[in-house]
Amino acid sequence: MPCSGKMDIKALTLPQLREELVRMEEKPFRAGQIYRWLHRAGDGRVRAKAFWQMTDISSALAEKLDQRFYINSLSIRRKLVSRLDGTVKYLLELSDGNCVEAVVMRYKYGNSLCISTQVGCRMGCNFCASTLAGWVRNLTPSEMLDEVYAAEEDTGEKIASLVLMGIGEPLDNFDNVVRFLEILSSPEGENLSLRHVSLSTCGLVDRIYDLMKLKLGLTLSISLHAPNDRIRGETMPISRRYDMDTLLKACRDYFDYTGRRISFEYALIDGLNDTPECAGELAGRLTGMPCHVNLIPVNPVRERGYKRGSRQNILRFQKLLEQKGVNATIRRELGSDINAACGQLRRESQQLPNDASQKRGELPC
Ligand code: SAH
């Protein structure tokens, strides 16, 4: 639990922790030991939840640390496991009682984890359940780390890749997300290469440029969902701040600067953005850009009337893009028996009494 006046030790990078220890008149090498207890697991060792669990430091130092710092933690409030493919969806409770979602997807190459970056979202995309109740607050770097650590501890397996595609807009929580990625990729910690991380944004252009300059090596995913400003304006309010020309120019610049191919997300909504004309227009705009289009049959959200088109329509859309030289795949749907659109589980937990979960084959936790 955060304690007033205490520092969040998990949110410190190793050099920052070293500085703190020097300030406390402790040996700098202790920082490495403490950092590994906080961020590294494996070989039978679990991450420490309290300073007294750090068995290679003295109890006097543990006491001193406890007076100055707190160790953040979160708990699994609900857990849904797909009987079809083992996908696990978590509702995670933060120390202030707010909840976010994380999902473990199982692939041949390993587990991929999708995490949230904010409690709620203020971007207002009208097909997305995460934004319906608005934005509450940003997640801290340690809360995002704890999403990863909780999923690994619960499954007993290390994650192979990470996607920032849960609740929230990562670029609207820029500094915390960058710090989180720095700690996550540090060799003394989880040591996940940022080549295995995808960050998805609805298109905050100024922040895309800020991210570009950091050259983190991650994959940038852009939620495009429309071939033009008129249709994008119907579903995504951000398009009024940055039109598609500005957004696509930022994507080209991002590729030129980082050499990293852009991935575009395109949720197909029946009759709105899935016509052959839309496919033609989209291909025209993306021609010549090193990119990949990920087609997603829209997840119907109870509060909205959007529907997904037929399988045939989706395949036709993909074919039309491919014919014009645009690389496109249809996202494989995982966990369809526990399928709750982005943010839907958290939304349900706000609206329904606790026992409503029993109807859905949910595991108690
Ligand atoms: N704010 C970020 C990341 C969170 S949403 C973003 O906008 O990219 C992750 C992805 O799921 C985005 O591409 C988002 O547009 C998409 N999404 C949200 N609700 C959806 C729905 N009902 N059906 C299909 N995709 C959806």
Image (cartoon, helix red, strand yellow):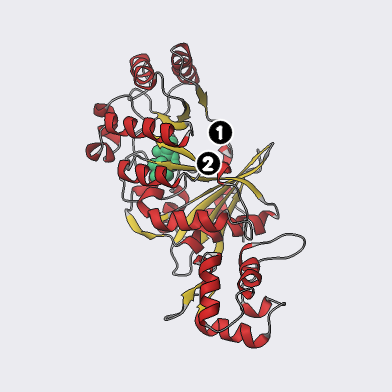
* Residue at the spot 61% in from the left edge and 50% down from the top edge: 192
* Residue at the spot 48% in from the left edge and 61% down from the top edge: 141
202 to the left or right of 220: left
Task: Examine the rendered structure and indicate whether residue 46 appears above or below residue 185.
Answer: below
Q: Quadrant of the C terminus?
A: bottom right
What is the x, y in percent for residue 204? 32, 43
Picture quarter with ligand 1 = top left
* Residue at the spot 50% in from the left edge and 63% down from the top edge: 142
Kind of element beneath mark 2: loop
Query: How far apart are the two marked residues, 1 and 2, measured between alpha carbons?
Result: 9 Å
Residue 300 at least partly seen: no
Kind of element beneath mark 1: loop
Name the residue at the right extreme.
43
Quarter holding residue 276: top left
Task: Examine the rendered structure and indicate whether residue 17 appears above or below residue 303.
Answer: below
Task: Examine the rendered structure and indicate whether residue 69 appears above or below residue 255.
Answer: below
Of labels 1 and 2, earlier in sequence is: 1
Residue under numbered circle 2: 339
Q: Amino acid at mark 2?
A: Asn
Q: Residues within 10 Å of mark 2 (few under 14, many from 20)?
A: some
Q: Nearer the viewer, residue 234 or 118?
A: 118
Q: Residues within 10 Å of mark 1 (few under 14, many from 20)?
A: few
Quarter holding residue 252: top left
Q: Which mark is residue 333?
A: 1
Q: Confirm or deny contact between disc 1 and disc 2 (CB under 8 A).
A: yes
Name the residue at the bottom extreme.
60
What is the x, y in percent for residue 266? 41, 30
* Residue at the spot 66% in from the left edge and 62% down from the top edge: 40
Residue 28 at least partly seen: yes
Name the residue at the top extreme.
323
What is the x, y in percent for residue 304? 34, 38
